[in-house]
Structures are given as C-alpha cells and as structure tokens.
Amino acid sequence: MKRPEGFKGFSIMSIGQVISLIGSSMTQFGIGIWIWQTTGNATPFSIVASLFFIPNLIFNPFAGALVDRWPKKKALILPDLAAGIITILTLILFKTNNLTLWFLYIASFVSGIFNAFQWPAYSVTISIMLKKEEYGRANGLFSLTESGPMVIAPIVAGALLPIIKLDGIMIIDIITFIFAVGAVLWVIIPDIRKEVTEKVSLFKDAIFGFLYIFKRKPLLYLLFIFLAVNFFSGFYTTLIAPMILAKTNNNAVFLGMVESSFGIGGIAGGILMTAWGGAKKKVISLLSGILISGIGAIILGLSRGLIAFLIACSIIGISGVIANASSQAIWQFKVPPSLQGRVFSARKVVAQLAGIIPMASSGIIVDRFLTPAFFNNTTKLSSIFGQSKGGAIALLAFVGGIFEVIVPIIGFLSPIIMKVEEEEIRPTA
C-alpha cells in the first residue's frame, strides 16, 4: 500500500492529531474540575497556564532552530511522546492519592518545553508538503486539530467523569496519543533541513528569526497586532472554566457545553477556511476575524445564561480560526520554507510575549481585588456582570473584548499592514 503524501498525507496526520488531542483535552478538563473542587480559587488556573506558557516562550526560538535542523517527523513526535509520559505519571499519582498542585505546576512547565516544538514543526510541514495555493485550506484543516477536541472532549469528559472518574479519563488519553505518533510515522514528509556548519551555533540560529522579523517592518507591524490581541484576551481566556463553574453552581455538564461551543465555532471556521481559504487579500479576513472575536468577548462578558454563553463562545471560536489561518497563510507565503522553523518560533514568542502578564495576574486580580465588589446584587457591577468571582471574570472579558475591537480597527487604518501581501518585503537597515 502506497504511503500517503501531499494534502492526503497531511489530512491523515491531522486526523491522528485530532484523536490524540481529544484525549489530552479530556484530561485537561478533568484536571480543571479537580483543581476547582480542591481549591475553589482562580489563582491555580493562572499558575498552571503561566507555567506552561513561560517555558514555551523561552524554548521556542531554540525549538525553531532545531526544527529547521532535524527531520520533521522527530519534531512532530516529540511533544506527543512527552505528553503521554506526563499523563502516565499524573495517573499514577492520582491512583495513589499523591496528586498535588505542585506536581501539576511542574508537569505544566515540562509540557511547555516540549510543546514549543509542535507549532513550528507543523507550520513548516504545511509548507514542504503542500502547494502555495493549498496553504489557506491546509491551515483551515489544521485548525480542526484544535477545534475538534474542544467540541468532543468537554462533553464526553463531562459525561464520563461521574462514571469512570479522572483516572479512567487519563487512561483514554494515554491510548489516544498512539494515533498521533502512528499517523506521523506513516505519511511521507519531505526531509528538508538546514545544513549545519560549525560556524553557526544553535544560539545564533535561535536569534536569527527575531533579526529576520525586526528587519522587515510589514511583518513586524502585523506581529504587533497579535501581540496586542493576546495581551487583552489573556485577562479572561485563562479563567473561562472558573467563570462558568462559578456562574452555574459548579455544573460540569454546563462547563462542557460551553467549552465545546468554542470548538463548534472553531470547526465551523476550519471548514469555512478549508473550503474558502480566506479573502483574496488575506489581511482583510485576518483583521475582520480579530474584530468579530472581540465582539464575541464583549457578549461573553455580558452573558448571564447558557444560551448567551454558547453564542458568544461560538463567535470567538469561528472568528479566531479565520484570523489565525489567514495570518499563517501570509507568513508561509512570505517566508522561505528553509527559514520558517526559526522565523515562526520567533514570531510566536513576540506575539505571545505580552500574554504572560495577564495570564499570570488575572487570577490574583480576580481573587484579591475584583471579587469583593461582586458579592451581592446591590452594586451596579453585579447587576450587569453577575455576582462573586464569576462576575469579576466576566468584567475582564467585557473590557478585554472592547480593546480587541479597537486593535484591528487600527490595523485597517495602517497602510503598512494593509499592503503586507502586495509589496516585496525587504530587510530595512
């Protein structure tokens, strides 16, 4: 039987990744419930997210340099293998009643290190496996690897938790990661690597991507758009689970439905981008997606019932995929494949750099400063956003959404950003 390649091979690899991520997302859902039931605080969610995020940023440039040097299959398999081992250790500790927040913090940090390889590896793989006219469709398809699990995992995990408990969820996760590794091993991926000489150190390769971007003003300005969006959205995205749990009396089924609505929107966006590929001028669909996502965040902050939550999260899901897939297509078209591992890793670091501030501080802001203003319905804020911690997090979503709307409007008014696809991007002095 002929091994698959091209778009077919990439599709099979994406399906394997979806299956694996469903298992991982189920475990994350169950762990989130465990943290909330154990502590009742929002701060541990911020800590877990930050300890995953920080090493991802720190090691991303080095991961990108290694992705350009290594066979792509090695870079694709490593994150899945590490995730599988961490889940096995978590399962053992849970079964022996030794699972602690401190272990979850360490596990998040280690996961962040290995996860740094995944995004640049898949980004480069699209470029070397497919034709340029397939980039938009492929990025739409790959977005389903994130959106699909978001639909299936919360609902399935929410339904199975009372029956098979957290340990049963983790066993499913351990089984599913085999599909991702098997799919990568089966498909044909061209072996394109950067030739390494003794004169070029790993450190120089790691900073190469930053120098490449900073010398090309259109790409740098485009990147600043995502830096701003990640900053403003970071104040509430980390705390979606505690917000829903606080507003629904710890209803895991409701939480599963709300989190799945993100995935439903993402799947709709992925299908749309797979069929459509985005606007002819990708920057238009990119900025429009960000603007609509900001409107969704505003609605999320104002939502008081399940239907409103589902609508808001679906809007954020679909618009986020449109924005990200359009952005990815621009970068894949503008940056040569042999440089993409380093450049895309640097791009991710810059775009997400400001996100660590709201991610690390949002839980503390809610627990220590905002919650006292939301203890009853006598205040204006409580009447608009709800009571206690749920209302405090909703306020963050509302304010973050307003700023998310402002950012793409600035982008539409910038000639440099609007012409990023039309002009040859040359380095500036």
Image (tube, helix red, strand yellow):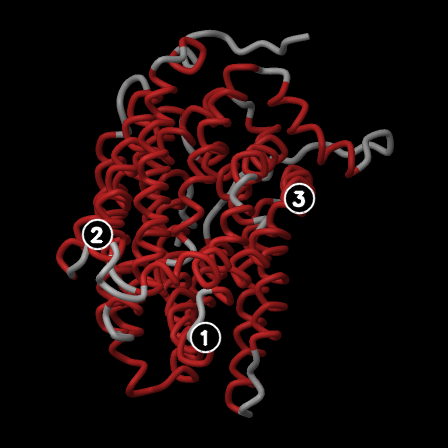
Distance from the alpha carbon under mark 1 to that under mark 2: 28 Å
Q: Which residue is mark 1?
A: 35
For label 3, the crowd category at 10 Å Cα-Cα, with few meaning under 14, some 14 to 19 and many 20 or more, is some
Name the residue carrying label 3.
70
Q: Local crowd at mark 2 within 10 Å, few (<14), some, or many (≥20)? A: some
Front residue of 423 and 254: 254
Q: Amino acid at mark 3?
A: Trp
Q: Residue at x 70, y 28 (%)?
A: 208
The x, y position of residue 5, in whole percent, is 42, 42
Q: Is residue 37 above or below residue 12?
A: below
For the view shown, which residue lies furthest in the bottom direction? 96
Task: Establish if 221 lies above or below 324.
Answer: above
Image quadrant in which the N terminus is located: bottom left
In percent of the image, x 60 and y 50: which residue is there? Answer: 56
Tell me which label, 3 or 2, sits earlier in the chain: 3
Dividing the picture into quarters, in which one does residue 131 lie?
top left
Q: Residue at x 61, y 51 (%)?
A: 54
Q: Nearer the viewer, mark 1 or mark 2?
A: 2
Q: Kindly state the secondary structure of the residue where label 2 is placed.
A: helix
Q: Earlier in the sequence, mark 3 or mark 1?
A: 1
Up-down relation of residue 269 to residue 340 (above or below): below
**Amino acid type for the residue under numbered disc 1:** Ile
Q: Which amino acid lies under the numbered mark 2 shown in the image of this protein?
A: Ile
Where is residue 150 drawn, in percent x and y? Answer: 31, 58
Q: Residue furthest right?
A: 198
Q: Please report the residue visible at 77 percent of the width from the left and 34 percent of the height from the top.
A: 196
Q: Secondary structure at mark 3?
A: loop
Q: Name the residue beneath numbered marker 2.
A: 384
In the foreground, 346 or 139? 346
Rendered location of residue 359, percent (x, y): 50, 51
- The residue mark sitting in front, 3 or 1, is 1
